[in-house]
Image: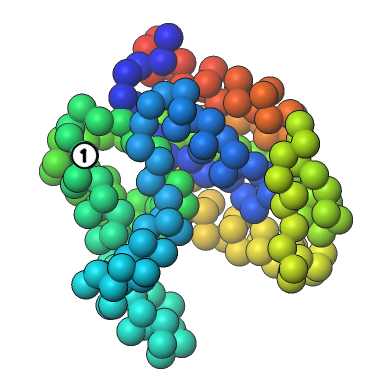
Amino acid sequence: MIARNPKLVLFGPPGAGKGTQAQLLKEQLHVDHISSGDLFRHHLSNGTELGQLARSYMNQGVLVPDNVTIDMVLDRISQLSESDGFLLDGFPRNANQAHALEGALNTNGHNIHRVVHIQVNDTELIRRLSNRADCPDGGDIYQRDDDTPEAVANRIAVYHQETTPVLDFYRERGLLSDVPGEGSIATVNQLVLDALDVLTS
């Protein structure tokens, strides 16, 4: 049985079905799904102080600094009690964010229990994203309008470049579980749940 109220991080390259698994885990584990993309949209659309700060950088055509993203995520986590579980999706994206998250969580009595990385080989990811291939079990179509094979390959390369140091960060702490992501949605979901069972072993 999976521990109650786990605090988790979910990784997966574009096309791996991470969003689908995040929604399943939210319902199965009764945890808050904290998506960095959703947080950005929330702060921008509501004109919060963090949203206005992020927009000021975007209007200049520059990347939003790590500290703004970190503050958005930590602000959301601060609204939870120590006993609440959560699933981080899309954060941390680099080692700097991972270190900041770890420090803040330790201070506030939170600790990450498990980091799950959904692995799909690059050839399959390119096939899924550039050929309008349906995801396993007939779920959502992966492709975006600009998903040429070349664009897809570049997105995947950027993902590996950004996330490899973060995965190593969590691997060194004994928190990382790599899960094969090339089966059906149900199969991958069971593998993820199996990986989380180590919380109670």
On the question of residue 54 being in view, the answer is: yes
Rendered image coloring scheme:
rainbow
Image quarter for residue 136? top right
Pinpoint residue 58: horizontal percent, then vertical percent: 41, 82
Looking at this rendering, what residue extends furthest in the right direction? 131
Residue 156 location in percent, x, y? 67, 58
Report the front residue among 89 and 107.
Answer: 89
Quarter occupied by the C terminus: top left
Q: Is residue 71 left or right of residue 107?
A: right
In the rendered structure, the answer to whether residue 184 lies left or right of residue 85 reads right
The amino acid type, in three-letter code, at marker 1 is: Leu
Q: Mark 1 points at which residue?
A: 80
Q: In the rendered view, would you say 200 is above or below 89?
A: above
> Looking at the image, which residue sits at the far front?
46
Q: Considering only vertical position in the picture, is 7 above or below 66?
A: above
Give me the residue at 42% from left, 50% from top. Answer: 35
Q: In this view, does 56 lie above or below 119?
A: below
Q: Which structural element holds mark 1?
A: loop
Rendered location of residue 23, percent (x, y): 52, 37
| Circle 1 Cα neighbour tier, 10 Å, few/some/many (<14 / 14–19 / ≥20) | few
